[in-house]
Image (cartoon, coloured by chain):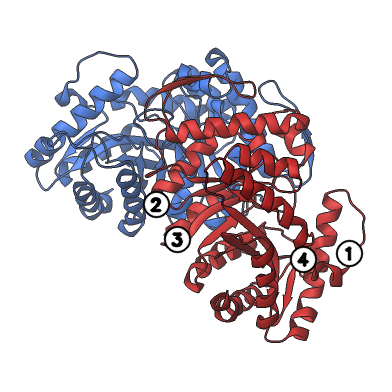
Chain colours: A blue, B red
């Protein structure tokens, strides 16, 4: 199992001080911690995309280009690129450029997006048509990245293209494209039907929710003679001992989840203890190893992405928890 | 007068060998030479945007993010961003992110674009409405970068926005926005009416063409009590002596201009001697100083951008001509 780091870029105040770092400090912290992630042995960095809210990464590929310039091996991904509300031509160009600049390290996790305001602001397509939109846009991305000749294209959700060939193209082959989904059986069936790698969502659920879904995905991929590739993610905080970890993380994770639920229009109360029994992992290195092993047993992911930087966690604490994870959890997985 | 470097990213074969470097080598050469440009004392780098042809920078802001990460002072600009065929929201997000990551060094030169195929491929707007499109999109960019509160917006050439505030915002103030234009009196009048800095085009014309246009722009800006800001650019090649410079550059510049004219549908023959008597500067350091002084007299630009990397010029020759320019031309301007 490979290990990666994921950041959604929430820009919340430190819950102890009420002070919010500047946007620049937050974005720099994401770039710098991603560079550090490579040194620590993580093999993938994945950044989210959001618009007009306090998840302040609106242009993840631009952040990845900065990270690429100071790293050599770590794979550079988004999680997710909101493809349904993006122009696949721009996305193809951006990731081909990133791939060329980084020596072939670009990957992309595409998602449909669930925010009707994003659909309204970017193109005005109907979220109800999300799956059809995604299917068309994934096809176009694929064609742009792989075609060795100019081609014509027309579709339902983007204007036609005439005699086009992508410049630059990706370095050697198309960036790996993951489908970011997995909340329903229908969604994993759809992903398998497209023959795509599956990246499970970073939501707070019980790990065992995903066991049956991943099983269906693997079976369907195998039936087609295709290689199943599964990614998973979880919020993680590790400290030298269990109690320190739990006390340290409580205000950050609680604040983050409270805010994130409000953003989704949910007022359901946040129960910290429940969260850290679910996909959020908190504890001593030994405890986190044990929790990761549960992930391994149930999902057996090819890549697992850890989200460390939530709820205004200070940069130094972020560095500490990442370093401890790398030193004492990573070698035991 | 500040000095900068501009690259349009043409990816042509070396005229001596017929060999084209890989796309990756070409893009890496642009990033690496931009980093070197800072060390040499240039104060601005500007990258062009093109699509589906052998100018292979399709995502200049992504290239700038890479350059930003390895530089500290050099200002990071496009020349030009094809704003009429871009979504101003994405452009605003990209340049705000670049501005935050780079400590406030983002600038943008926006242009209408003259390629009907680009209009067709990106949004299908009518090139004949280019000026109206530009005017609306510049206004939206400005509002996105400057608004301290969420706002509603609607216009003719993009879907409406409701209750939006850009995240991230630019670092301290909006990136300087230049209008890339200046081929006609009408265009400089329009730029002055918008109160914008004027970046003259990188076309091959006689320098004195621009004298009267810049004069009109300056007068109109002064009438409004606004600070005129003028940028200019030229293709440059410098070698230790005049004859070496002229012989060295001939196949690269000739090949480049022949190709660039074909791309624009022109078959007018290329006369190298005429080119290097126009805005293209070629010669010994003393000769180039003299030519730059003519620019200074006629245009008196605040910034002058030199385009060194044309027509498959090898990276080593690019480094040599840039270094010689920095050592022996720059100090005398």
Single out the mark in the foreground, 1 or 3: 1
Measured in 3D between alpha carbons, the distance from the residue under mark 4 to the one under mark 1, in whole angstroms, is: 18 Å
Answer with mark 2 or mark 3, whichever residue precedes in sequence: 2
Asked whether disc 2 touches disc 1, contact meaning CB atoms under 8 Å apart, the reply is no
Q: Quadrant of residue A126?
A: top right
Instruction: State left or right for residue B39 relative to residue B24.
Output: left
Asked whether disc 4 touches disc 1, contact meaning CB atoms under 8 Å apart, the reply is no
Which residue position is annotated with label 1? B270
Task: Name the residue: 69% across, 44% down.
Answer: B188
Within 10 Å of disc 1 (Cα), the crowding (few <14, some 14-19, many 20+) is: some
Which residue position is annotated with label 3? A72
Within 10 Å of disc 4 (Cα), the crowding (few <14, some 14-19, many 20+) is: some
Measured in 3D between alpha carbons, the distance from the residue under mark 1 to the one under mark 3, in whole angstroms, is: 43 Å
Measured in 3D between alpha carbons, the distance from the residue under mark 2 to the one under mark 1, in whole angstroms, is: 51 Å
Task: Name the residue: 50% across, 34% down.
Answer: B142
Identify the secondary structure beneath mark 4.
loop
**Residue projecting furthest to the front:** B223
Q: Do dots 2 and 3 share one subunit?
A: yes
Single out the mark in the foreground, 4 or 2: 4
Residue A43, numbered circle: 2
Image location of residue B114, percent across then percent down: 76, 42
Image location of residue A284, percent across then percent down: 14, 43
Which residue position is annotated with label 4? B13
| Residue closer to the observer: A269 or A275 | A269
Q: Do dots 4 and 2 share one subunit?
A: no
User: Which chain letter goes with mark 4?
Assistant: B
Single out the mark in the foreground, 4 or 1: 1
User: Which chain letter goes with mark 3?
Assistant: A
Asked whether disc 4 touches disc 2, contact meaning CB atoms under 8 Å apart, the reply is no
């Amino acid at each position: 199992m490979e290990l990666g780091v994921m950041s959604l870029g929430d820009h919340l105040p430190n819950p102890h001080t009420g002070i919010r770092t500047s946007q620049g400090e937050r974005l720099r912290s994401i770039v710098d911690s991603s560079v550090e992630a490579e040194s620590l042995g993580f093999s993938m960095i994945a950044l989210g995309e959001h618009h007009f809210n306090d998840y302040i990464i609106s242009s993840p590929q631009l952040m990845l280009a900065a990270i690429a310039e100071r790293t050599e091996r770590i794979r550079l991904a988004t999680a997710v690129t909101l493809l349904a509300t993006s122009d696949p031509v721009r996305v193809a160009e951006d990731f081909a450029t990133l791939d060329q600049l980084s020596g072939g390290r670009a990957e992309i996790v595409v998602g449909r997006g669930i925010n009707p305001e994003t659909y309204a602001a970017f193109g005005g397509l109907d979220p109800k048509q999300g799956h059809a939109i995604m299917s068309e846009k994934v096809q176009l991305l694929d064609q742009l990245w792989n075609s060795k000749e100019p081609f014509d294209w027309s579709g339902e959700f983007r204007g036609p293209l005439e005699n086009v060939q992508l410049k630059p193209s990706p370095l050697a082959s198309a960036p790996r494209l993951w489908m970011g989904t997995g909340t329903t059986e229908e969604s994993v069936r759809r992903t398998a039907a497209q023959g795509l790698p599956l990246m499970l969502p970073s939501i707070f659920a019980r790990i065992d929710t995903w066991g049956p879904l991943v099983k269906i995905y693997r079976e369907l991929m195998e039936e087609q003679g295709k290689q199943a590739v599964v990614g998973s993610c979880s919020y993680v905080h590790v400290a030298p001992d269990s109690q320190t970890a739990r006390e340290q993380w409580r205000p950050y994770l609680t604040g983050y989840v409270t805010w994130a639920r409000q953003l989704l229009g949910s007022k359901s109360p946040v129960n910290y203890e429940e969260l850290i029994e679910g996909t959020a992992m908190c504890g001593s290195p030994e405890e986190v190893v044990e929790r990761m092993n549960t992930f391994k047993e149930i999902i057996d992911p090819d890549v697992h992405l850890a989200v460390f930087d939530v709820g205004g966690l200070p940069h130094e604490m972020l560095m500490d928890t990442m370093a401890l994870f790398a030193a004492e959890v990573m070698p035991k997985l």
